[in-house]
Structure formats: C-alpha cells, structure tokens
Image (tube, rainbow, N blue to C red):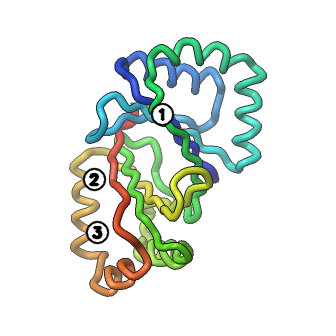
Amino acid sequence: MIIERFFWQTRNDVELIALVKSAIERSQHPDGRVFTPVFGAYGDVIMELRSDSSDAAAAFWKHWHESGLNDEFAPKVNPLITSKGRHETWEILEPVAMQRGRKYVDWRTFVVKPGYEKQAVQLLAKTRQTFNRYEILSPLGGPMFTLALVLEFDSLDAYLQEWDVWIRDTSTPEFWQEWHEITDLGGESVPYKLR
C-alpha cells in the first residue's frame, strides 16, 4: 500500500479545500482525503491519496493527466498556493485493520539511525501488540531515515487519552532503552483534522 501526501500553503484554505475535494471526487480516486493541521502552520492543506501499489498510483496519475483533470485543476489552484509545497510518498510496512475516516489523524514521525529501520519497525510492531492502533510507514520519496506512525481518532480527547495510556502502560523502560539506541533526536507529531 502506497500513501502520497501533497502539502500546500494557502491564504484561502476554504477555497483550496473545496477545490481539492472536488478534484479527488472528479478523478474517482478510490481513497483520497483532505486534512488541515489542528496545531501547526496556518494555511496548510494536505491531500492524501492511498493506492494499492506503486503501479496503481502511476496509473492514477496517467489518467489524471490524460483526462485533462490537471489542465482544469492547476489554473484554479495555482493562484491560491505559495511555492512552499511538497510531495511525499510513503509505503505502509505494517498495515492494520484500522478504522479509517475518523475526524482526526495523527502523523507521528521518528528519525531512525541509518541501518536500524528494520529493528525500529519490529519494535514498534511489537509495542503495538494486538491492538489496531497505528500503521507503520517508511518513505519512498521524502525524508530519509524516517518512520511514521499513523493513528486515527474521533476526537482530540481520544487522541490525548491514547498517548497518555501508551506512555503510562505500553512504553516500558526496556522499550525506551532500545528505542534510544536505534533512533536520533527529531521527528514530529502533527494531528490533522479531516475536511
């Protein structure tokens, strides 16, 4: 499974969100959605597209360009955005049967020391236990030496409670000792609101 994320900065997020949602709908992409950060840069709009494989993502983009959707979308969007956007492509390494479509999504990234990605994935998967709490992702195009966890919540209270429980009950001293041996400082946690 592949996730592509497009980040745009805009002074008119309401209009950009409407255009992006319309473009996803018109493109008939089977799994696209739009987010804005709950806490973070004002005016950021994020489009996420999930595809079953890199080939499926490439087929979507071929359709996007050949159908004329890009020629229709770009002239409307370009006046609304700044030049500070970016595109990331991630692979889901450890998928779960997580309930999707909740109101909030937490993208939590970690910087992993070179050569320790597999060990970090195994540790995160083991810590996840049997709960369908988060997917574990690795970038195909984007930041190097980084892993991400993706969690979904119905409310900000549920988001805070999940991390409180995780810190109190799940993250043992043994976990932290191993985690600090294989990771570096850095990363971020950004809760997004589904639009």
* Tag 2 near tag 3, CB within 8 Å: no
Using the image, determine if residue 138 lies above or below residue 194: below
Tag 1's secondary structure? loop
Tag 2's secondary structure? helix
Left or right of residue 88: residue 173 = left
Of the residues under marks 2 and 3, which one precedes in the sequence?
2
Q: Mark 3 points at which residue?
A: 166
Of the residues under marks 2 and 1, which one precedes in the sequence?
1
Q: Residues within 10 Å of mark 2 (few under 14, many from 20)?
A: some
Q: Which residue is drawn at 40% across and 75% down?
A: 127
Closest to the observer: 105 or 183? Answer: 183
Q: Residue 87 sits in which quadrant?
A: top right
Task: Quarter of the image for the C terminus: give it.
Answer: top left
Alpha-carbon span between mark 3 and mark 1: 33 Å
Q: Mark 1 points at which residue?
A: 85
How many marks on residues?
3
Q: Name the residue under label 2.
A: 159
Q: What residue type is labelled 3?
A: Trp
Alpha-carbon span between mark 2 and mark 3: 11 Å
Of the residues under marks 3 and 1, which one precedes in the sequence?
1
